[in-house]
Each structure stands twice: as structure tokens, then as C-alpha cells.
Amino acid sequence: MKDWMKKLELHYERIRNRYPKDRLMILFDIDGTILDMRHTIHYALKSFDDLHGTPFFRYLKIGDIAVHETEVEALLEKLAVPEEERNRVMEWYEKTCWSADAILESHRPFMGVMEVIRWFQIQPDTFVGLNTGRPECIRTETLYSINKIGQEFKANFSHELLYMNANGWEGDIITSKVAGVLHFQRSGYRIFAFIDNEPENLRAVSDVDPQKQILLLHADTLFKSKRRRLPPHAVSGKRYDLTKLIHEKALPQHVQLVWHGVNDEGNLRQFLASGIRWAECDVRLDPTGEKIVLRDDSFESVSLQEDEELLTLEEILDPIRRAGKSLKLDLKENGVLIDQTLSILNRHSYDGKNLWFNGRIDELKPEGFRRLAEAFPQSIIQCPIDSLIPLILSVPGKALALLDTFRDWGVNRYSMSWKSPSIHCVLNKLDKWGFEANIYNVPDLESFLRAVLLLPVSVTSDFNFPRWHYYGRGSGGNQKRHTYGIIRTPQSLSV
């Protein structure tokens, strides 16, 4: 059986091709499907201890909870909570579990689910609906909470696309789920998939979909109804794996992709044979100071190895241009390096539209950036701003003044590491201020896809993605240089 996310990708593509003008919708349940309800149980029980001064849940961890949110009494028994105390705990739990505080403070999404939602929200004429058994009376808290969670992932949810149980806490959830599907269909959406953790909900939806156009996906988390209630054509899964859902050809075309570390022949050949437009090369002077070579590490920190063959900047210029690709140069020094680099680029008649320069503020300094901007006014000129992130988040006015100063030097794009804290907040700030942003230091395919979903102007990665048959920097035995060769490389692109 195919992975459930791969099945979802194929089904979505098939429905989109069959109904190109329709408004397509994927429906998500919330509790147990988007949200890991173990956190809510944990919050409620811990708060009982805090309020009553009891030690019953002192050592309770999320991983210890293996019961549905409606079956907490069994957990109390397992934890040896005294029988005479269980009624009091259960009364507290039922009162607290759906309180505004619990909803706002304890809700946590399953890993990857918000990115899956974000992916469909950025697809054309595609909508994400929520179909929950929660009652209408907690609509405001539900929307506020789930939008607060989604903010980090740029996922958002609206009142119009949230269907809740109209019959209150005691209302029939199965009937409500079917009513939600019919409601969205009457509203003009073609539902192509429905994700829920309860088998009986999926069974009920299957009964009102005789043509089986709705892909039924079972979130195999914690559920109350019997697994045998699953429809035969439903697909179960535990992990929201973006790498199974998103194919390279489906990536947003307006996000520029940059292959980092094109410093050796193996990486160059891989890059030239790929669909990636930009190659980033680390540029520095060789130990003699006579040639510009491609190397990540400085010769002071890592001395030249006996078997190391250095590529020069001049060697890569024509192959990259013949392939219709573009060049990003990470300049590791100022002064002579910039002089010689500009001279070589001019000698090879390189166009500024196909050039991108990156350098640290403390390395290139104002005069270095100004020289680059003057020489190639149409190029991208970038500097990393990781050290400024605390300032951007705490004193934005001061940070904005600094970024404006850098822009006066010629900098027109700012770069930050994927591992930087609160990266989504920084991206939002830069976008609000009118600055372009690049994300770099993206270590693997899943992180790369998550970065792309934030829709920065560009993403820089090593492209060591075996699933896509890319073997970027780090694939070689010493994690720096490659030991493989490319068997089939067009003669016109050879180095």
C-alpha cells in the first residue's frame, strides 16, 4: 500500500486534472488529527495537581498518555490514582479540558500537519476546510487557538471554512461530520479528501460518497471507534511527511532555489544536470594569492590537502552560462579578491541579471558592497543578518534603520539561517518593510520543503536530497568533496 501522503498527492493531481476549474477542498478533523490531544490531557491533569497540591501526575509525561481524551479514567487507574480521588479528578478534567485556558494553552499540532495544510492553502483554487465534532459554543476559542498555532507556518483558518457541531456537547458527532461534508459541497466546493482519526467518521462519509471521489485518510493516532469500522478504501498513516507529498516539479516557481557549495567537479556536474538555476560558490584567493579558487574553508583553518584539486572561478563560468544558469558568489574576503573577481566577470562578459553576490558585513564592509553595486547594478547583493535577529524582534525601529543603511550601500537582499529562532516572525518583518529575504543553511529535504512553504524570495541548500536523486555537498566520504562521478552528462555542459 502506498504511503498515505503519496496517495494524497496522486489523488489531488488526478482530481485537479479532471476538474481544472473547480474549487477543490481537503477537509481536516481537528482533535486527534491536527491536534495531539495528549497535550490537553497532560495540561488538565497537571493543573489538578497544581491547584490541589496533589502528587498524582508529578512524573506524568506526554509519552505516558495512550488513551483517547474521552477515556482518561482508564489512565487514572493505570497511574494508581486512589479510587476515592478519581471522581474528583474526572470532574476537574471534564471541566478543564475544553476551557478557554486549556484550548489556548495546551493545543499542540502533530509534526508536519500544519505544513501539509499550508501546502494546500497555497495551491490555486484549493481550500482547506475544518470539519470538527466540537460544539458551536467554542467557535471563537477554536479559531483563535488554531490560527495562533498556524501563524508560525503561515497557515490560516477562517470562520467560513470551519464547520462545527450545531447540536452542542451531546450532539451526534458522526451525523455532524456528514452534515459538514454536505455543507461544503452545497457551498460549491469539490471535496477531494477527508482526514479524520475516527474510523466511524470516515465510514459515515464514505456512505454519502457513492462515486468514491473523496479520498478517506485515517490519522492513525488515538481513536475511540474500532479500526474495523474503516472503509476498505481508506488509507491510514501516522506521519505527515512532506517529502512524500511535495514533488520537485510542484515547487512554487517564484521562489528562487540556490545550490550551495558548488565548489568541486562532482557538485558542479550535479548542479549542471539539475533543474536548479542558481549555483553558489565559495570564493577566495588561493594560498599564493594569484588565483581565485572555490573552497568553503579558509586555508588558515583547513590547510590544502595533498590530493585536493581546486576549481578556479574561471573554470566554471562558461559551463554555467552555457547551461542557461546563474551564479551566486559568496565572497570570503574584501580588497584584492573583489578586484580580481570583478575583473574576471567583466572579461567573461557576465550579465548582472545572472549574478548574485553574498558577503558578511564585517568582511566586505561598506566600500566592498558599494563596489559590487556600482560594477553590477542589476545583480543581487546580499548579506547575512543572523546577528541582527534579536534586535529585529526586540527593537524593530533600530533594526530597520540599520537595514536601511545597508541598503544605501547597495545590499538588496538579506539572508538568515534556517536554524535562526523565530524565523517566521523575521520573514514577516522583512516583508512588511519591503526587503527581500533568503533562507540558507537548510540541511535536508524536509527542512527545505518547510522553508519553501514560508515563501521567501529564495532558499539556499546543499541539495543533498537522495529522494530526488540530488547528491549535494556532504555526500562524499569526507563530507566535503565527492567520490562519485556522473555517468551521463551532456558534452556541452562538461567542465
Image: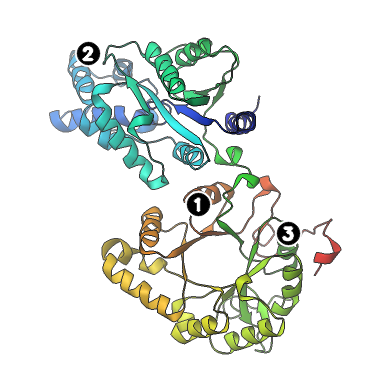
Question: Which quadrant would the N terminus be assigned to in this image?
Answer: top right
**Dot 3 crowding, Cα within 10 Å, few <14, some 14–19, many 20+:** many
Q: With respect to residue 235, does 449 lie above or below?
A: below
Q: Is residue 411 above or below residue 126?
A: below
Q: Amino acid at mark 1?
A: Ala
Residue type, label 2: Glu
What residue sits right under mark 3 in the picture? 270
Which residue occupies the extreme left position in the image?
Answer: 52
Question: In front: 82, or 44?
Answer: 44
Q: Which residue is mark 2?
A: 83
Label 1 to label 3: alpha-carbon separation: 22 Å
Q: In terms of sequence position, does the residue under pointer 3 or pointer 2 come before the other? A: 2
Task: Name which quarter of the figure residue 304 lies in.
Answer: bottom right
Between 226 and 346, the one lying in front of the other is 346
Answer with mark 1 or mark 3, whichever residue precedes in sequence. 3
Q: Nearer the viewer, mark 3 or mark 2?
A: 3
Horizontal side of residue 132 vs 298, given as left or right: left
Q: Which mark is residue 451?
A: 1
